[in-house]
Image: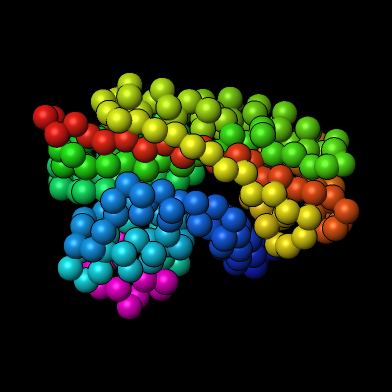
Amino acid sequence: MRKPPDNYMMLRDAVGERRLRLVDRAYGGASRRVLRRIGLDEGQRVVELGCGAGHMTCWLADQVGASGRVVAVDISREQLEHARRRCAERPWVDLVAADARDTGLAQGSFDVAFVRLLLMHLPEPERALEHCFELLRPGGVLLCEELVVSSSFCYPAQEAQGDLHRMASAMAAARGCDFDVGRRLHELLPAVGFAEVQAGAHQPTASTGESKHIESLSFSETLRLISDPSEAERARAICSALTTAANDSQVVYGQSRMVQAWGRRPASN
């Protein structure tokens, strides 16, 4: 196996940070609107599972203020280090390295739970939702946001995008995951006990701008998981073609649809 260059981890980290920044720029506004709608307010205790580099963590902390608390959880210590630097001036933020399905946090201790782009990476997404349910106090509310990866589009259509959808679906299936789990959120939340469940969706679309690169950046990060040289080469060709499409102002790029579902832990539980 070819030895990666000495700066491989640094480059990979930079790509991941850029991707997460663009994801928040494209999807974060809708997240914030729904969180306000469901009652996020000053003084509340919030748990964020899969916080990544902390883009939403900072905003959540600003909403609850110093009288509240935000506990942000991620399994990646690299991402938590980014979040730590980003949230350095907000001492009411706690960063926890843990599995989102079993954080070790006290049950019934949070008013709001927020999950974005986590379930698609888990073989048993129900377990993370069950844990969210346990962490919330009776009457507490969850907002969960997940993609339907196969819903991205280009106009004019790009053959590479169809190739990406097929390859991504196969990769997810091999890991027991579902990259289109967003389609099932309205069923998953009630199945683990959430009530008053509502759902919505949005799909950022643009002809210019950095957001057009989210898909190719996301897919490029999976290259390290591909051991077969021919498959890796095919994936690189897909990324290259989609980068070219993203740089073309004549191509309209629709990112994957983000489904939002929110529900409440019944007050009687």
In this rendering, would 115 be left or right of 3? left
Can see residue 245? Answer: yes
**Residues in magenta?**
84-98
The image's colour scheme reads rainbow
For the residue pair 175 and 131, the one nearer the viewer reads as: 131
What residue is shown at x 67% (from left), y 34% (from top)?
151
- The extreme left residue here reads 268
For the residue pair 226 and 68, the one nearer the viewer reads as: 68
The vertical placement of 219 against 88, above or below, is: above
What residue is shown at x 44% (from left), y 29% (from top)?
185
For the residue pair 225 and 208, the one nearer the viewer reads as: 208
The vertical placement of 130 against 40, above or below, is: above
Percent of width and height locating residue 62: 33, 68
Can see residue 98? Answer: no
* Residue 42, picture quadrant: bottom left
Percent of width and height locating residue 76: 43, 53
Percent of width and height locating residue 17: 56, 63
Q: How many marks?
A: 0
- The extreme front residue here reads 37
In this rendering, would 199 be left or right of 92? right
Percent of width and height locating residue 119: 45, 36
What residue is shown at x 85% (from left), y 38% (from top)?
157
For the C terminus, the image quarter is top left
For the residue pair 7 and 257, the one nearer the viewer reads as: 257
Check residue 110 for magenta coloring: no
What residue is shown at x 75% (from left), y 39% (from top)?
153
